[in-house]
Amino acid sequence: MPMQKGFDVDFDPETLNYDAQGLIPAIAQDATTGEVLMMAWMNAEAVTETLRTGRVTYWSRSRRKLWRKGETSGHVQELVDFRVDCDRDCLLLRVRQTGPACHTNRRSCFYTAIRDGAEVEIMEPMA
Amino acid sequence: MPMQKGFDVDFDPETLNYDAQGLIPAIAQDATTGEVLMMAWMNAEAVTETLRTGRVTYWSRSRRKLWRKGETSGHVQELVDFRVDCDRDCLLLRVRQTGPACHTNRRSCFYTAIRDGAEVEIMEPMA
């Protein structure tokens, strides 16, 4: 069941360990299938926003602003569970993904495998 | 089936996108269960070493040297599949994990969940 909106506003994002740019990597995983969908970055504001709204929000390093995943594409990530690793410097987001997670229209960004020294595409773009 | 040792030595690690420190994040996922075990970092040498040997090798940022996962603990990661994301700046390693992946003796480093604004440990250390 998706996390109740506004449920986790009491969590203090400053207890996480950010890098020199104030960012922490966040892995998005399909909560149902276990498929790893993508990795992106969050700052403290994105963490708070994600927990407050129940919709995953990253920090776009290229656009230098909050990136509400799916805001324009509709390919939103509904937060199901929010996990922190032992060093508190990486996040694991269990999500319900609408449509493709990847901007190439594939379900996951990890659609390339290295096999026999060559790159193989193991996933088609979604219809 | 684990990747045949020495199979992928032809892959050029310089085709990946590393950060300013020459590192790329690598997510380790249990190839059987889909569980996300940990996230660590690789440099080009660690990538080559991992593909060459079929044993996952990271770059230890604290010790500033190659970190052959499980070298002292025996908790090795056997490489099953090596994947690259769309931006070529993140790796997904499908592995066969021996024992716990986490230094706290838990199967996964992501044993803490944020629920109702509080932190909950959702995984016990392995016996």
Image: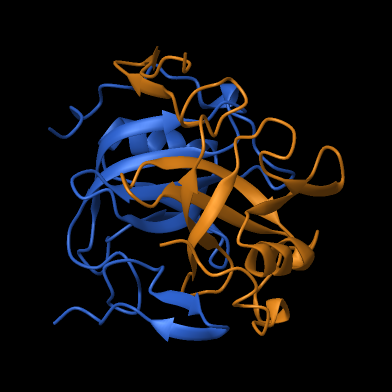
Chain colours: A blue, B orange
Task: Please name the residue shown 27% across and 61% down the image.
Answer: A70
Rendered location of residue A32, percent (x, y): 18, 45
Image label count:
0
| Figure check: A77 above or below B44 | above
Q: Is residue B16 left or right of residue B117?
A: right
Rendered location of residue B18, percent (x, y): 70, 67
Q: Could you say which quadrant of the image residue B4 lies in?
A: bottom right
Rendered location of residue B6, percent (x, y): 65, 73
Q: Could you say which quadrant of the image residue B73 lies in?
A: top right
Viewer-side residue, B75 vs B123: B75
| Figure check: A67 above or below A9 | below
Viewer-side residue, A106 vs A113: A113
Task: Please name the residue shown 62% across and 26% down the image.
Answer: B103
Task: Please name the residue shown 69% across and 53% down the image.
Answer: B57
Question: For the N terminus of chain B, which image quadrant?
Answer: bottom left
Task: Please name the residue shown 63% across and 54% down the image.
Answer: B56
| Figure check: B101 above or below B85 | above
Viewer-side residue, B1 vs B84: B1
| Figure check: B79 above or below A8 | below
Rendered location of residue A52, percent (x, y): 31, 31
Furthest residue in direction right, as rendered: B64
Q: Is residue B103 left or right of residue A53?
A: right
Q: Is residue A78 left or right of residue A61?
A: left
